Image (cartoon, helix red, strand yellow):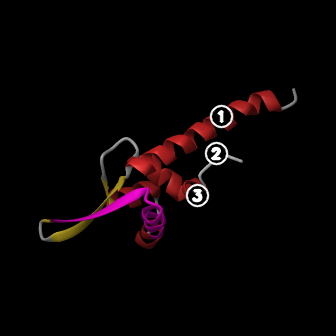
Amino acid sequence: MSGLEPLIHAPARLELCGLLAPVDDAEFSYLRDRIGVSDSVLSKHAKALEDAGYVKVIKKTSASRQRTWLSLTPAGREAFRAHVRELQRLAGLVGRSMPS
């Protein structure tokens, strides 16, 4: 059984987790622009991660505008760390498993 987390493995969700991992939280628009997806695509991915308990969605009002912030939950941080460890393990196999 692979140690990869299928929910995190989708490219946009993997990048979303990667952007959230080193910070406490990040604004939705920043994440959308960095990942290069539409609002609806990011919302869909954020919702999938939220439903799994990996992401927390926070609505804040600032300057009379509601803004959305995302953060990784402790479970999300651990799932992302485990996923990255497995990717690193698999990447380490490349040189050993390929014939010369």
- Of marks 3 and 1, the one in the foreground: 1
- What's the magenta region? 44-61
- Residue at far left of view: 63
Name the amino acid type tagged 1: Arg
Disc 1 is placed on an element classified as helix
Q: Nearer the viewer, mark 2 or mark 3?
A: 2
Above or below: residue 18 compared with residue 58: above
* Location of mark 2 (residue): 3
Q: Earlier in the sequence, mark 3 or mark 1?
A: 3
Q: Position of residue 63 (x, y in %)?
A: 12, 66
Quarter of the image where one finds residue 56: bottom left
Amino acid at pointer 2:
Gly
Q: Is residue 53 magenta?
A: yes
Residue type, mark 3 in image: Ala
- Sooner in the amino-acid sequence: mark 2 or mark 3: 2
Q: Nearer the viewer, residue 69 or 40?
A: 69
Query: Which residue sits at x=57%, y=55%?
Result: 11
Q: Are marks 2 and 1 in contact (CB under 8 Å)?
A: yes
